Image (cartoon, helix red, strand yellow):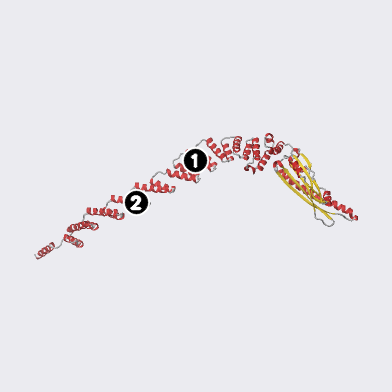
Amino acid sequence: MRIHLLLAAATALISCGPTVETYLKKNQYHKATTFCGSQDRDSQKACYAKVGDAYLEKGDLDRAAKYLDLAGAREKVNTIYLKIAGRFEADGENDSALEYLKKAGAKDRIRLIYLKIGRASRARGDVSNALHFFGLAGAEAEIKATYKAMGDKLFAEKRYKRSLEWYRKAGAPTKHVYLRLAQRMMELKAYFQAGPYFELAGKRPGDFYPIIARACLGGEQYPNAVYFFEKSGLPKASYLQEVVNFALSRRKYNQAHFHLLKMGRTQIQASWHTAVAAENQGDLMLAGAFFMRAQNPGRSVAAYLNVLGSSDNRYTARHHEARSRLLELAGPNTAQAFTTVSTTKDLKPLVELLRRKATGAPYRVVIFDLGWTGILGKAALNTATSIPLPRLTPRAFLRVLGRRRGFTVQDRVLDAQKTQVEGRVMRSVDQVALKAAKSSAPEEILIQWRTAHKELPASPNHIGVQITMHLTVTVPALKLVAFYSFSAKHSERISAPKKKEKKFKKEKKLARKLVYMKLREKLKNTQEKVRSFLKEANLR
C-alpha cells in the first residue's frame, strides 16, 4: 500500500514538471534534446520529432535532419537532405551536394550531378576527369562524345595519328584523318606511305595514284612515277606519253628516250623523236648525239656545225667538244653528209678537213721553213751557219697520218728580213708574208720551222753560239696548235798556231758534228711529241 502511494506521488510530480515544448519555447534546445533522451522509447520519437520540427522552422537543416532521423521520419529527412544538396549545388559545391544526395538516396539527382561535372571537365579539357564522372553516371553517349571532342582537338593541332585513337574509341568517322595523313605524306614526299592512307580515306586507286605519280614526276622520280601510273589502271600508252612529255620539258632526254622504247618505239624512232625535241629546245649537242643513234648523220653533222656557228654563250664553251664529235663522226658512213652539208664561210675549212678524213682524201701538210733569226757578229755568224742542222721531213708526220692516204706535202721557204746594224747581221721572220701564206690554206696542217741563233758571251780565243730550234704545229680548222723547242750550245777556238792548225780544224769539225748529233737526237724526241699531238687530234 505504501509503495503504490509513492509511485502515484512521483507520477504526479513528473506530470506537473516542464515539458519539451517548454524548453523549445524558451529556445533551450540542448535541454530539450536532453529531456527527449530521458524519455522512454515510446515517447522519445515523438519528442525528437518536435525538436526536429523546431530546428526546421529555425532553418537549421542539419540538426533538423539529425533529430527527425532519430524520430524515424525518414521522408522528412530525405526532403531536408535534398534541400541541403540543392543549396550546395547552387553554390557550385558539387562534392558536398553529392554527399547529401547519397544520404537521401537520390540516384537520379546524383547522375545529373555527375553529368554536370563531366561536361564541365570536358569543357576545360580535363578529359580524364570527364570520363571518370561520365563513367559513374553510366553515360555511354557522353563518353563517346568526349572521345570525339578529344579527337577533334588533336586533329585541329595536326596530331593526326593520336586523333585516330580517340576517333576509334568514339566510333566516329576517320576518313578525313586518313586523307590528311595522306596529304602530309605527299608533302614529305613519302609517296609509298601516302597510298595506303588514301585507300583508308576511301579514295579509289584511279583517283589518287595518278596524283602520286605526277608528284613523283615533279621530283623527277621516273621509275616511281611509272610504278604508280601502273597501279592507277590508266592505259599504258597514255601515261608513258605523259612521262615522255614531262622528261622532254625538263630536258631529261635519256629518260624520254628510255620511256619511248617502253612504249614500243624502235631505237631509230625513239632516237629521232628525242633528237628533234632536243633540237627544238636548243640542246644541239644532245640533238647531234641522238640523230646519230637515229642513223641520220646529216642532221647530226648539221647540229654540231650549228653549235660551232652559233655566237650564243652557252655554245661557246662547247666548241671544242663539237669539233671532237665531228672528228669522231667523220668516216665512210658520214662521207655523204660532209659532202652535201651547207655551212657558213667560216666553217668551210673545217668541213673540208672533215670531208677529207671521211672520204680518205689526202690532207695537205704545209711546212714553212722560216730559216734562221737572230743578231750575230760576223765571226759568230760564220760559226753558226757552218754548223750542220737536222732537217724536218714529211716522213715525221706520215707515221701518224697514214701513208695510204697519199698526202700532198709542200715546202714553202719564206725570205727573211736582213739588216746590217753596226757590224752585226740582224735577221727576222717576214711576218706579213707568213700570215698571208697561212691564211691561203686554212684547211691544211701547217708546220712552222725556225732556227734562232744567239751569240754567247765572249771568252779568250773562243767564240760560242746557242742554237735553238722552234717548231709550231697548227691545225687552223680545228683551232689546235702546239709549240716545241730545243737547243744546244756550241763553242770553238778562233785560231791556233800554224803547227797545230791541222789538229785545230779537226777539233772544230768534231765539235760541230757533236752539236749536230745532239740537235738531231732532240729533234727525234720532238717529232715523237708531234706524233702524239696529231694522234690526239684524231685525224687518222
Q: Where in the figure is residue 272, as x and y percent of width and height?
A: 61, 35
Front residue of 460/353: it is 460
Where's residue 104, x and y in %? 26, 53
In the picture, measured across the screen, residue 90 lies left or right of residue 339, that is left
Q: Amino acid at mark 1?
A: Ile
Residue 391, placed above or below residue 16: above
Which residue is located at x 66 percent, y 42 percent?
319
Q: Secondary structure at mark 1?
A: helix
Q: Residue furthest front?
A: 422
Q: Nearer the viewer, residue 235 or 374?
A: 374
Query: Disc 2 marks which amino acid?
Result: Ala
The answer to which quarter of the image holds residue 281 is top right
Q: Is residue 169 above or below residue 348?
A: below
> How busy is the neighbourhood of tag 2: few (under 14 within 10 Å), some, or many (20 plus)?
some
Q: Which mark is residue 387?
A: none
Res 536 seen here: no
- Which residue corresponds to mark 2? 120
Mark drawn on residue 211: 1
Crowding near pointer 1: few (<14 within 10 Å), some, many (20+)? some
Q: Gap in Å between the C-alphas at discs 2 and 1?
A: 45 Å
Element type where label 2 sits in the image: helix
**Residue 177 sits in which quadrant?**
top left
Q: Which residue occupies the foreground of this view, 411 or 156?
A: 411
Which quarter of the rendering shows the N terminus?
Answer: bottom left
Query: Quick one: quadrant of the C terminus?
Result: top right
Nearer the N terminus, badge 2 or badge 1?
2
Residue 129 appears at what percent x and percent y? 36, 52
Q: Are marks 2 and 1 in contact (CB under 8 Å)?
A: no
Q: Please, is residue 44 above or below residue 248 in the view?
A: below
